Image (cartoon, rainbow, N blue to C red):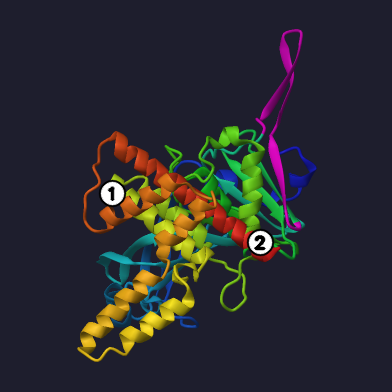
Amino acid sequence: MPSSAACSVTVHTLSRWMDRLLGGSRVIECPHMKLLGRDHEPPVFTGPGHIRIGADTRMQFVMHGTPRDGPDAFKRVVEAQRNPYDANHQFRVEAVGYDGTEWSGGWTSVAPGEASGDVWRLSGPIHSLHTDARGFGVAEHSGVELVYDRSLRLPISMNMVKTVTRDGKEVLLSRSAGSKVVGVLDAEIEFFRDAEREHVWAVARTSPSFPHPYLENWISEPLNLLLGEIVSPRLVARNFGDGRAFIALREATGHPADSLVASILREDPLGAGERFWSLYQDILVMIATARDANGDRNFEAHPLTRYYWEIVQATRGSNWVLCMTLASVVEGLVKMTSPTASQEANWPENDIRSLRNAIGSWKGNDGLRDSVLNYFDRRTTKGLVGVLRSLAREDVISKPQVEAWASLRNSSMHGEMVVPWSDQEQDAQINHLIELTHSVAKLYIGHELGKAA
């Protein structure tokens, strides 16, 4: 528990759930479980079972279920297996523990096992485990609490331990957590490390710019870009401020980064200091002010975050995969930043129109004329490489970065192998491509912040 006043109330909710749900294997025995089909229908199966939370963070339920209607239940299991992507044919798992806690495991794919009489052994994965908390121990203010169950390389002050001894005996031991408060728009987000556990916390109250349910997702998104790894909280509390809270336990999503390839910082986050948090603020403002085509906030991850997820995963593949991914990300980001730039002409508009009309009026083979017109249109627009060269002339990016993009994109996208071993020339090109990717990402962030201002 932190000692700061900002967190002393907010963190209260999850402190009850830490030892119960995190750290090593856990088994929740459930005397009452049920598998549900469509909404408003009675359970397909009911019976006792358990939910296992593995040390690898994966979760699974096992149930000894009695079908409400044997033939219908068998038909539903078969239909679920035949239609794995259709939620209308899948099952939802719900359970009640011996302590009365009601758990929801969401959608699951059911694997039937042995049957003994009317009792079926059923099992399946749980990707997110939910429950509601009420009354005592729930934070009094509307906000969120997030717990990351692995060490994150965040530049925050160290935990402090103070020991007082008298006559050679310890008479006082106190612990306090280092923390970092980041102000973003109309909200404050506090990050700190648990003084007694290897967990990182993030807590914040809701505000007009950061309402439920978006806040719990948005807080983590900038960390994906800054750390160069896939980051999401393992344990979440959505506090409503009226004595209620929504608790969610999730699977771990990724591994610690083993290089800086996917980090937009391009330096060790622990040494970045205020640069880390300044960029965190910019990215979070971009995410919080983004709107979809209907003008609504985005609950799902921002496109820039999703691009960086791809980069993170590509760093664990071959050089070929990495080059294709980086080149594609650059192309996608340029199109998002300047959607019409690649269509801008390289020559005066009147000259282009006159020549195009001349080609169009040629009386000959229609197919040949259309082919020439298509070629003409491609040659008279700037194209993506032209946009990048314009940015290089403006010193936004460098010429070697553009050349590396053009070379590696064309070769990797057209089947030419990128050597998997270290090669001086190729490594230099890949490094240029990496730097280009992050430079274009920063350009996009600045573009979006300009729109939001």
Range drawn in magenta: 157-186
Measured from the top left, where is residue 297 in percent x and y? 62, 70
Q: For this rendering, which residue is in front, 60 or 84?
A: 84
Measured from the top left, where is residue 82 in percent x and y? 27, 75
Amino acid, disc 2: Gly
Q: For this rendering, which residue is in front, 297 or 264?
A: 264
What residue is shown with label 1? 320
Q: Which mark is residue 14?
A: none
Measured from the top left, where is residue 206 in percent x and y? 72, 60
Q: For residue 361, say whether it is visible.
A: yes
Instruction: Report how far apart the C-alphas of labels 2 and 1 lie in the structure.
Output: 35 Å
Could you tell me which quadrant the C terminus lies in? bottom right
What residue is shown with label 2? 450
Q: For residue 1, say whether it is visible.
A: no
Q: For this rendering, which residue is in front, 312 or 231?
A: 312
Q: Image quadrant of residue 413?
A: bottom left
Amino acid, disc 1: Trp
Secondary structure character of the magenta stretch overall: strand
